[in-house]
Image (cartoon, rainbow, N blue to C red):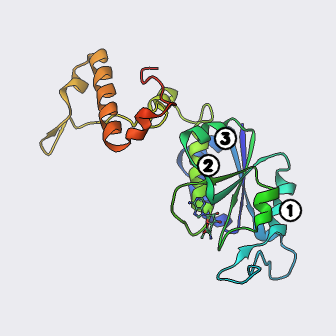
């Protein structure tokens, strides 16, 4: 089982995503356990202050270190601590696989101008960015990490074979997918997919996966991480 503790100023943000679909099922089946902690419960003044002005001046507020340290140390002293941060390692399928092997993850969602540097220097094991853009807070990035990691926990996704074929897993983007109806508004499903020839279907999918990867993400094809598509 994978335990995930989320540390946030906005715990309500996680209610619906964690209460729906596969993430809900994964928790109901005891495969993943997610606890969401309100940082304000770890503040010490009656206004529940979790942020303050930056030393040296400047715009915005910075998240104070004390509530973050105290919360993480109390709820997950042995957890692998991740801070969602634009300065972090770019999120990737490889990183998701690494995190899925951990027993206990802690995800800290920043807000405002971010967190006090001492949190990054002395509490956090890894900073992760979800891309070269800035979101309003770390909640949506934390959810991306939860989604990517939870589905790699054995048993969470029904069809494990589909995991191996997905974009990024085999060093390529995925081939096109079709479902019924066989013809829609005059657009037909490629004949090979309804031919019943398993080998031809496989060959078509491989060719299409290579084509789309070449067009959209040629960097993946030259990557040393590329694995055999057929595996
Ligand atoms: C408005 S952002 C702060 C941005 C910060 N002032 C900077 O320039 O790097 C507030 C919080 O959102 C989260 N965040 C924003 N963009 C992110 C990204 N690309 N990846 C991960 N977290 C992000 C982080 O937790 C961050 O502390």
* Separation (CA) of disc 3 from disc 1: 23 Å
Estimate the spatial distance between the alpha carbons at disc 3 and disc 2, rounded to whole Å: 10 Å
The residue indicated by pointer 2 is 146
**Along the polypeptide, which appears first: circle 1 or circle 2?**
1
User: In this orientation, which residue lies closer to the viewer: 141 or 126?
Assistant: 126
User: Residue at left 75%, top 49%?
Assistant: 125
The numbered mark, 3 or 1, whose residue comes first in the sequence reads 1
Disc number placed over residue 155 in the picture, else none: none
Q: Quadrant of residue 156?
A: top right
Q: Earlier in the sequence, mark 3 or mark 2?
A: 3
Height in image: 223 above or below 28? above
Cα–Cα span, label 1 and label 2: 23 Å
Q: Which mark is residue 99?
A: 3
Mark 3, mark 2: which one is toward the viewer? 3
Are there few (<14), some (14-19), or many (20+) residues within 10 Å of tag 1?
some
From this viewpoint, is residue 9 visible? Answer: yes
Q: Quadrant of ligand 1?
A: bottom right
Q: Residue at (57%, 39%) from the top-left corner?
A: 151
């Amino acid at each position: 089982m994978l335990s995930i503790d989320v540390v946030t100023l906005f715990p309500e943000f996680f209610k619906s995503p964690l209460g729906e679909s596969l993430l809900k099922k994964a928790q109901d089946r005891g495969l993943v356990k997610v606890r969401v902690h309100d940082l304000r419960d770890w503040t010490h003044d009656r206004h529940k202050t979790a942020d303050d002005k930056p030393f040296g001046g400047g715009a915005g507020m910075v998240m104070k270190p004390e509530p973050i340290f105290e919360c993480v140390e109390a709820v997950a002293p042995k957890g692998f601590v991740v801070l969602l941060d634009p300065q972090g390692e770019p999120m990737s399928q490889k990183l998701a696989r690494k995190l899925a092997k951990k027993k206990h993850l802690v995800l800290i969602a920043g807000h405002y101008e971010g967190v006090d540097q001492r949190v990054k220097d002395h509490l956090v094991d890894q900073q992760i960015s979800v891309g070269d853009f800035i979101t309003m807070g770390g909640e949506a990035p934390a959810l991306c990490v939860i989604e990517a990691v939870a589905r790699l926990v054995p048993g969470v996704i029904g069809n494990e074979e589909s995991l191996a074929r997905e974009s990024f897993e085999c060093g390529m983007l995925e081939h096109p997918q079709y479902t019924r109806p066989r013809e829609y508004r005059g657009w037909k499903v490629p004949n090979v997919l309804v031919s019943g020839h398993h080998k031809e279907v496989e060959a078509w999918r491989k060719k299409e996966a290579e084509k789309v990867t070449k067009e959209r993400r040629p960097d993946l094809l030259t990557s040393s991480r590329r694995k055999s598509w057929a595996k």
